[in-house]
Image: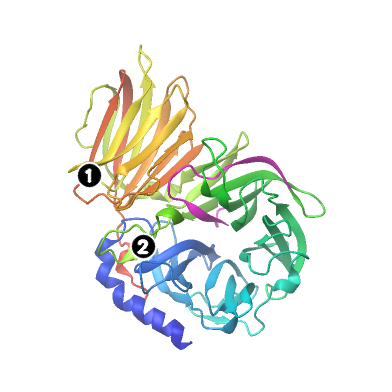
Amino acid sequence: MTEKLQKARDYEALHRPEIANQLPAFHLTGGVGWINDPNGFAPYKDEYHLFFQYYPYDTQWGPMHWGHAKTKDFIRWEFLPAALAPDAQYDSSGCFSGGAATLPDGRHLLLYTGVEIRPEGEFQTQCVAIGDGVNYEKYEGNPVITAADIPEGSSARDFRDPKIWQENGVYYAVTVNRGKDGSGDVLLYESPDGLHWQFSSILYSCGYRFGSMWECPDFFHLDSKDILIHSVMEMRATTLEYHNGNCKMYHIGHTDAEKHFHAEVSHAMENGLDFYAPQTLEALDGRRIMIGWMQAWEGSKQKIPGMGFMGQMTVPRELTLRDGRLLQWPVRELESYRANKVEYRNVTIQEETALPGITGKVMDLILEIAPTETPYTRFTLEINRGDGFHTDIILFPQKGTIRLDRTFSGHPHDVNHIREFPADFHNGAIRLRLLLDRYSAELFVGDGEQAASMVLYAPEKADGITLRSDAAVQVSMEKYDLEITENWRTNHGK
């Protein structure tokens, strides 16, 4: 083990216990310091491992390490010691995003981007580390994919984020690359052993249709379709579905014999204020599970004074296909942590109302809203309310949109706090599921046709919830506390 990696492990083991009581109840963080993109999300020895972009020493972005955690049920996480540090020449400026796979002999393979800054510029290459699920050694043949393995005219500087999988005895990986037209390409590579790679095809090209450079690709099969997911830099707002800046997209389509992907349908992956760089795995029971970084780059400098961590992951979500849309729903395992059910059926709501028992900051809340004789045009659910704080989720059934407004949610800086997105209403009726944790809200519409995440910083005592409408509506609600016993916060990766 190198001195740099040992230093990171010693630091996290010492400082994670100091801030354990600050952490979210059921959303994964690094336990200390900064995290961003999820990496290496894959099964290994009947558990699920997740690595993440990590800088343990501060709550802001720094030289990238790989943090590490594992879980059996996607809810309770156990911290493991940091897996990678930027301690080789080819990754001296950071160990950036990548994926993981299991080798035939049972060893765990990590494929990641190494960044090296030389006098002539920045270079990004793909590198391998191999280990036992806790300790990893960098492959002596690194880097395994270099600028010699990209199409002519492509960029050696913007060439990153490999996602690896195995299929029919062959290892595949997709990376992103800035193509010769200056916009993003997704490149496909093949390997017989995970160590020796060759270029296969330009799987899909941006052509400036969706932003410029792309990041964090993922490619998988679901219900006889091929799905490509990626994050987008410098997106231009075109409808309420897409906003300016960093966006997330999925494409549903098929791949031809020459290994070129053809998109049939394209949509935004998420509609919230805080979501980026998602990564998926195939669970041991066949489900496709996705997790994302619940943060936006534009707001990533916002933090509560004294907070010892920055960045958290979404709740893992099950992905399914229906009617040409990719649906997202919290993993079913979360429901086994529900407790203290409070239920209301067909309550008439118009004036501002706080229902007894519907309060708190850690919960699973299900709402069904339906119009009465007079159609409503605006319905507001206020969460995290108290002492002047509140966050609003506003329904506009006639416009067919939902607005998130966290202007008064405790954020210390003036970044974007409002986002409105299309939603599926049925004659004014709609079903919502809302997951609240100490610093976040994740909203799911209908059966998961839309999902929207946001980070919130209202203090603990701001835990009120109210409802109001501009015309009488019928509201049914189920509220569950979420009790995550034997939480991952009790294990600090020693």
Q: Quadrant of residue 213?
A: bottom right
- Residue type beneath disc 1: Asp
The question of residue 265 being in magenta is answered with yes
Asked if residue 295 lies left or right of residue 184, the reply is left
Locate residue 463, reporting x and y percent: 22, 44
Q: Name the residue at 44% across, 75% down.
A: 82
Residue 201 vertical placement versus 418 (above, below): below
Q: Which image quarter is the C terminus in?
A: bottom left
Q: Nearer the viewer, residue 16 or 480?
A: 16
> Can residue 269 be seen here?
yes
Q: Magenta span covers which residues?
A: 262-286
Asked if residue 291 lies left or right of residue 169, the reply is left
Residue 245 vertical placement versus 77 (above, below): above
Which element type, helix, strand or loop, lies under badge 2? strand
Mark seen at residue 463:
1
Q: Name the residue at 72% across, 61% down.
A: 188
Colour basis = rainbow
Q: Name the residue at 40% across, 35% down.
A: 403
Mark 1–mark 2 Cα distance, whole angstroms, equals 22 Å
The question of residue 348 being in magenta is answered with no
Q: Which residue is mark 2?
A: 310
